[in-house]
Image (cartoon, rainbow, N blue to C red):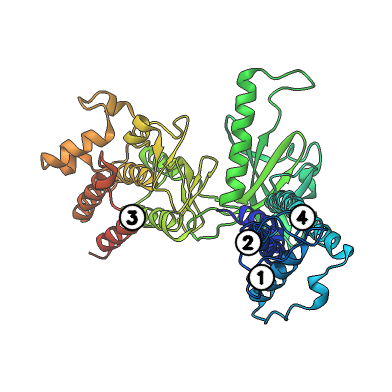
């Protein structure tokens, strides 16, 4: 149960218990009266007389069946009322007086009035209880709604006006990002990337801590210009982009870890959203591996192993230490950025999802991710778990050892037509060296390369239950590096 639901239930139950206590306290007299009336309807012998009193106007009785409260026997009624009420309280009933033997006309008329008064009290209690319960329920629902709105406003879900939201102390105040609130805020910036949802720009800005390089991701909120209605496809794209923005803010907007790329700020405009990150000048792992294959950049095995360890540590934080657990769902070399020290930083949390503690998996309506890195069970059942990310990590580790990507034409020409299956067959045949990237093979580290391939094969097992956890992966890689 969420905190807002708990607050609603608590608020609704307060008046319930208040009126219940009132009703319980008041019910004592009502129950006593009910028992008295019930007793009065049954014939009871008179304890002081052998014959019932004669209450007829003529002074003589024709029948002995007039005791109790039959007819207009007010005297016996008074005695029974007195006896019953005092018995309930533990007191001793007084002796009957002469006045009670010959009651006045007012004695006969007082008791029906008391009975009606008691009935009115019970009715009023019931009405008060019902009205109070309804009022408490309504007030609880109102409180719950307001509480939820406040939380969502804090999280930025109901931001309806333009503005800047800071997530880091890198910026002293929002004024340092005022240029993004202008119509041509990124017009003169360096374009470093382009995707389906928008573009990525680089800029140097002066902050309180000095000059800082930032990457600005622009996500469009309108698929068409002007006031023309959007097509169904454009509407779906817009919903997808908005979901990615919310996912980014919910994850990296509040998570801090050395192997996760931090979200520094979010700038909202009516025509677009700007997500501000730290700029990683070494680019992505995909870019570095491609440059290494082309010979324009060197990436030796110790550097690759250190990158793999960083990815495993970042996943460990998401899968184990963060509550609720987070599944990235789109782990690939292109979403692993490298900082100035070639330290891995997992990025692009647009498809990331939280898994509540009580759940072992989540189900989605469509498969998300990149072909070649998606776990097979995700294709088949639409269910994703933390083990889905482990499969993706296994493919990334294999790519770093082989220097080949799942989409390379090399694997399309093999019998397996799959990087993972080809790797398994080579290891089973004892031909691990056929998998090694020639850029790093034969440098005295082939044993580590083979062990890393086995870890990659372990992570990419077909059954999720056969895959290790990210913590186990990190420990195995650390042992390889120390060997």
Q: Disc 4 to disc 2, how far (Cα)?
A: 18 Å
Q: Which residue is mark 4?
A: 119
Q: Quadrant of residue 103?
A: bottom right
Q: Disc 2 to disc 3, how far (Cα)?
A: 91 Å
Q: Disc 3 to disc 1, how far (Cα)?
A: 91 Å
Q: Is residue 262 visible?
A: yes
Disc number for residue 479: none
Q: Earlier in the sequence, mark 4 or mark 2?
A: 2
The front one of 196 and 30 is 30
Classify mark 4: residues with Cα within 10 Å, few (<14), some (14-19) or many (20+): some
Q: Circle 3 — which element?
A: helix
Q: Disc 4 to disc 3, how far (Cα)?
A: 84 Å
Disc number for residue 39: 2
Q: Disc 1 to disc 2, how far (Cα)?
A: 9 Å
Residue at far left of view? 429
Circles 4 and 2 in contact, beta carbons < 8 Å: no
Circles 2 and 3 in contact, beta carbons < 8 Å: no
Q: Earlier in the sequence, mark 4 or mark 3?
A: 4
**Depicted 93 relative to depicted 161: above or below:** below
Q: Which residue is mark 3?
A: 305
Q: Position of residue 47 (x, y in %)?
A: 63, 74
């Amino acid at each position: 149960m969420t905190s807002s639901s708990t607050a609603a239930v608590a608020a609704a139950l307060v008046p319930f218990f208040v009126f219940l206590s009132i009703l319980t306290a008041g019910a004592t007299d009502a129950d006593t009266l009910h028992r008295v009336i019930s007793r009065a309807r049954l014939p009871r012998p008179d304890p002081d007389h052998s014959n019932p009193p004669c209450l007829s106007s003529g002074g003589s009785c024709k029948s002995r069946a007039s005791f109790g409260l039959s007819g207009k026997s007010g005297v016996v009624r008074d005695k029974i009322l007195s006896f019953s009420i005092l018995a309930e309280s533990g007191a001793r009933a007084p002796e009957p007086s002469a006045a009670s033997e010959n009651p006045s006309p007012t004695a006969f008329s007082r008791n029906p009035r008391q009975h009606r008064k008691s009935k009115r009290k019970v009715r009023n209690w019931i009405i008060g209880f019902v009205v109070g319960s309804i009022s408490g329920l309504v007030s609880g629902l109102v409180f719950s709604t307001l509480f939820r709105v406040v939380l969502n406003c804090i999280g930025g879900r109901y931001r309806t006006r333009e503005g800047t939201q800071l997530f880091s102390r890198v910026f002293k105040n929002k004024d340092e990002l005022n240029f993004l609130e202008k119509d041509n805020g990124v017009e003169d910036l360096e374009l470093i990337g382009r995707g389906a949802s928008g573009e990525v720009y680089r800029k140097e800005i002066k902050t309180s801590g000095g000059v800082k390089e930032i990457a600005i991701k622009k996500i469009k909120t309108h698929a068409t210009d002007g006031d023309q209605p959007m097509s169904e496809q454009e509407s779906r794209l817009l919903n997808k982009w908005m979901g990615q923005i919310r996912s980014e803010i919910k994850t990296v907007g509040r998570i801090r870890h050395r192997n996760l790329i931090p979200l520094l700020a979010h700038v909202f405009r009516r025509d677009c959203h700007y997500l501000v990150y730290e700029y990683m000048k070494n680019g992505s792992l995909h870019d570095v591996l491609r440059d290494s294959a082309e010979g324009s950049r060197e990436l030796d095995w110790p550097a690759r192993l250190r990158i793999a360890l960083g990815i495993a540590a970042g996943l460990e934080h998401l899968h184990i230490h963060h509550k609720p657990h987070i599944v990235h769902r789109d782990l690939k070399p292109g979403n692993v950025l490298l900082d100035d020290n070639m330290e891995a930083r997992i990025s692009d949390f647009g498809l990331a999802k939280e898994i509540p503690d009580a759940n072992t998996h989540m189900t989605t309506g469509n498969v998300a991710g990149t072909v070649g890195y998606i776990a097979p069970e995700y294709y088949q059942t639409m269910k994703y778990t933390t083990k889905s990310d482990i499969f993706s990590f296994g493919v990334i580790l294999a790519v770093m050892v082989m220097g080949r990507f799942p989409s390379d034409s090399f694997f399309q020409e093999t019998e397996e037509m799959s990087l993972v299956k080809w790797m398994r067959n080579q290891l089973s045949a004892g031909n691990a060296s056929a998998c090694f990237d020639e850029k790093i093979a034969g440098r005295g580290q082939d044993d580590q390369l083979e062990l890393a391939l086995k870890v990659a094969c372990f992570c990419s097992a077909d059954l999720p239950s056969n895959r290790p956890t990210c913590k186990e992966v990190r420990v195995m890689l650390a042992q390889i590096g120390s060997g």
